[in-house]
Amino acid sequence: MRTREEKSKIIAELTELLKNTENFYVADISGLNAAQTQQLRKLCFNKNVKLTVVKNTLLKKAFQQSGKNLDELMPVLNGPTSIMISEAPKAPAQVIKEFRKKADKPILKGAYVMEMIVVGDNQLDFLMNLKTKNELIADVVLALQSPMNKLLSTLQTNVSNIAGVLKTLAEKKSS
């Protein structure tokens, strides 16, 4: 049993972690054996995802103290809980999806991603397909470039045609 001071320290650490992250997932990894847990941790490490098993009561207090509105995630904090933290919004979803090719877990309980709360394992595919702000900007730039490239190509063709006509007229005039 942890002392009150130890619990307070854990809550403070969790709170600070939550304040400084834009993306975290809450998952259930219970039932994995030691080898599976090690494989999951290795996969998380490779994808830059920090995986921590937490007590629900401590995580609830950290949620309340984080300064973020995480009320929608409170109901999922029951049973065994792990928190997956990553700078990349969909990295934890990729880890879960990839690992579940070999096991039934982790089960997604909920996620806080780019200031949005998502609840339920049925949202995993949605999270996998999320685009970051930079990816969306790149899509917009590509969409704008495509018509612009066609316009430039058409203009270039027209300028070439006009130049040809002017050259022909100049040759006729000089002869």
Image (cartoon, grey):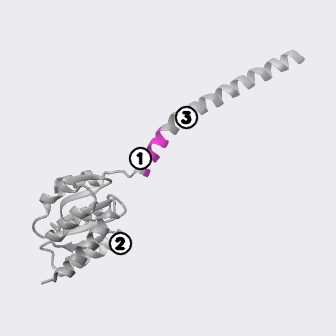
* x 83%, y 20%: residue: 170
- Classify mark 2: helix, strand or loop: helix
Depth check, mark 3 against mark 1: the one in front is 1
Q: Position of residue 109 (x, y in %)?
A: 17, 60
C-alpha span from label 2 to label 3: 40 Å
Residue, disc 3: 148
Residue, disc 2: 46
Residue 136 is tagged as 1
Above/below status of 140 relative to 123:
above
Q: Which amino acid, by three-letter code, is at mark 3? A: Met
Q: Which amino acid, by three-letter code, is at mark 2? A: Asn
Magenta-colored span? 134-143
Q: Tag 2: Cα neighbours inside 10 Å, few (<14), some, or many (≥20)? A: few
Q: Position of residue 70 (x, y in %)?
A: 22, 57
Residue 118 is tagged as none
Label 3 with label 1: CB-CB less than 8 Å: no
Q: Quadrant of the C terminus?
A: top right
C-alpha span from label 1 to label 2: 25 Å
Above/below status of 65 relative to 8:
above
* x 79%, y 23%: residue: 167
Question: Given the current orientation, which residue lies at the most extreme right position?
Answer: 175
* x 89%, y 18%: residue: 174
172 relative position to 50: left or right: right
Depth check, mark 1 against mark 2: the one in front is 1
Looking at the rendered structure, the number of numbered marks drawn on it comes to 3
Q: Is the stretch drawn in magenta largely helix, strand or loop?
A: helix
C-alpha span from label 3 to label 1: 19 Å
**Looking at the image, which is closer to me, 48 or 105?**
48
Q: Position of residue 153 (x, y in %)?
A: 60, 33
Question: Given the current orientation, which residue lies at the most extreme left position?
Answer: 79
- Classify mark 1: helix, strand or loop: helix
**Looking at the image, which is closer to me, 61 or 118?**
61
